[in-house]
Image (spheres, rainbow, N blue to C red):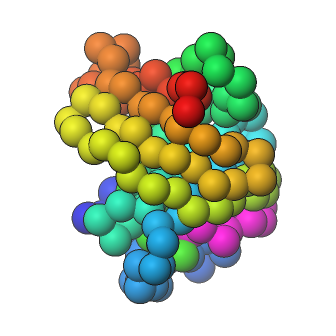
Amino acid sequence: MLEEYEKKRHFEKTSEPPALDLQESSEKPVFVVQRHDARNLHYDFRLEMDGVLKSWAVPKQPPKEIGTKRLAIQTEDHPLGYVNFEGKIPEGEYGAGKVEIWDKGTFELRKREEKEIVVTLHGEELKGDYVLIRTKYGKEGKGWLFFKRAD
């Protein structure tokens, strides 16, 4: 499940948690949004599902207001230990740049289908019902639309 994550990283060079650093799922599922100042500043939105963090790269700050929509590109799953990761990924490594936690909390899964995920987020920055809808954008169906909906 985390093979792609492992293949992209050299753990002797980066402080990112290895996939083998498995953690038990939390009592309440968690989410994290990491501000990732890499080649291009973006935000990594991660939801705890299936024993991993399902992950999307969001090119702009995640929406706090109803009506604001963001593109979200699905990326490889990350280990649960990544929920607390902050630090600098060294130059020459995949994702090189500074990673800091922008928001973190728990969530309730309202709906999960192949083309739609609905969650209620309980964070400091992001609160309320959020939707991810798969689009035809991007290769291999990795493009999603991410937005806050009316509670």
For residue 116, side relative to residue 70 (left or right): left
> Looking at the rendering, which quadrant does residue 136 occupy?
top left
* Residue 28 sits above or below residue 120 on the image: below
The residue shown at (58%, 17%) is 69
* Residue 110 sits above or below residue 137 on the image: below
Magenta span contains residue 130: no
The residue shown at (28%, 44%) is 112
Q: Is residue 48 visible?
A: yes
Residue 32, position as x, y percentages in the image: 62, 57
For residue 41, side relative to residue 10 (left or right): right
Q: Is residue 7 visible?
A: no
Q: Nearer the viewer, residue 4 or 103?
A: 103
Quadrant in the picture for the C terminus: top right
> Looking at the rendering, which quadrant does residue 117 occupy?
top left
The residue shown at (54%, 26%) is 149
| Magenta range | 82-91
In this view, which residue lies farthest toward the front? 151
